[in-house]
Image (cartoon, rainbow, N blue to C red):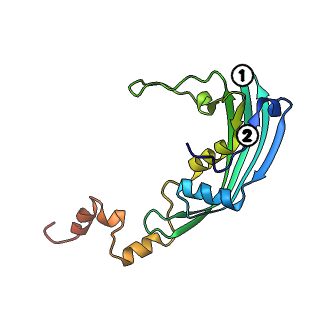
């Protein structure tokens, strides 16, 4: 296992009386996070959270903010973006172990942000990086992507779709 890019360890003792955390990643951490998440650049990565002890673990509520540059899914051009993603996580001792591959489980919305407590500590920095990864656009698109693709002869979905040929037939004699 590799070392985390943005470690921020919080213990039960730290969270016992509540703790406000506000940190920004330095250039080296941002570069490592960008590599891990496949970003062109990560110009800013900040975490603000309130952490407190709860029965059976630690609760963390806050927001991840980032200025990212992703590669366009169609043209590979840079697509800048700003992310402000709130989170509300509970790290608990009694989170069920993962089930086998063939077993199906139902997850309710109240279970979505439950994570296992590792001993008496959590890595809030890792949770922040994972929150960022979930907030990224999976298919970023540059504003000029359609024009660039058209100039290269790539048909749009409307022009290449199954109804495009039928649309061309409309209005032709004998059709």
Horizontal placement of 155 versus 5: left or right?
Answer: left
Residue 42 shows in the view? yes
Q: Residue at x 23, y 62 (%)?
A: 166
Q: Which mark is residue 4?
A: none
- Front in this rendered view, residue 157 or 174: 157
Residue 82 shows in the view? no
Q: Position of residue 81 (x, y in %)?
A: 61, 62
Is 29 placed above or below 61 here?
below
Q: Which residue is mark 2?
A: 9
Real-space CA distance between mark 1 and mark 2, rounded to the nearest whole angstrom: 18 Å
Is 115 placed above or below 56 here?
below
Q: Residue at x 61, y 24 (%)?
A: 95
Residue located farthest toward the right when viewing the structure as drawn: 17
Q: Residues within 10 Å of mark 2 (few under 14, many from 20)?
A: few
* Label 2 secondary element: strand
User: Toward which corner of the image does residue 29 lie, by quadrant?
Assistant: bottom right
Is 138 placed above or below 165 here?
above
Q: Which mark is residue 56?
A: 1
Q: Quadrant of the N terminus?
A: top right
Q: Residues within 10 Å of mark 1 (few under 14, many from 20)?
A: some
Mark toward the start of the polypeptide (1 vs 2): 2
Q: Quadrant of the C terminus?
A: bottom left
Is 110 placed above or below 43 here?
above
Horizontal placement of 106 versus 80: left or right?
Answer: left
Q: Nearer the viewer, mark 1 or mark 2?
A: 2
User: Toward which corner of the image does residue 69 lie, by quadrant?
Assistant: bottom right
Q: Position of residue 21 (x, y in %)?
A: 80, 44
User: Toward which corner of the image does residue 126 lie, by quadrant?
Assistant: top right
């Amino acid at each position: 296992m590799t070392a985390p890019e943005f470690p921020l360890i919080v213990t039960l003792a730290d969270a016992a009386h509540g703790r406000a955390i506000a940190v920004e990643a330095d250039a080296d951490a941002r570069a490592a996070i960008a590599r891990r998440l496949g970003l062109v650049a990560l110009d800013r990565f900040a975490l603000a959270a309130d952490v407190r002890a709860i029965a059976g673990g630690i609760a963390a509520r806050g927001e991840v903010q980032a200025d990212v540059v992703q590669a366009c899914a169609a043209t590979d051009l840079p697509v800048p973006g700003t992310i402000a993603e709130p989170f509300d996580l509970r790290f608990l001792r009694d989170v069920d172990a993962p089930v086998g591959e063939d077993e199906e489980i139902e997850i309710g919305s109240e279970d979505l942000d439950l994570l296992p407590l590792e001993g008496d500590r959590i890595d809030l920095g890792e949770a922040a990086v994972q929150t960022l990864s979930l907030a990224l656009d999976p298919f970023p698109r540059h504003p000029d992507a359609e024009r660039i693709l058209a100039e290269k002869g790539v048909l749009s979905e409307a022009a290449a779709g199954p109804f495009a040929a039928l649309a061309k037939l409309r209005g032709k004699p004998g059709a």
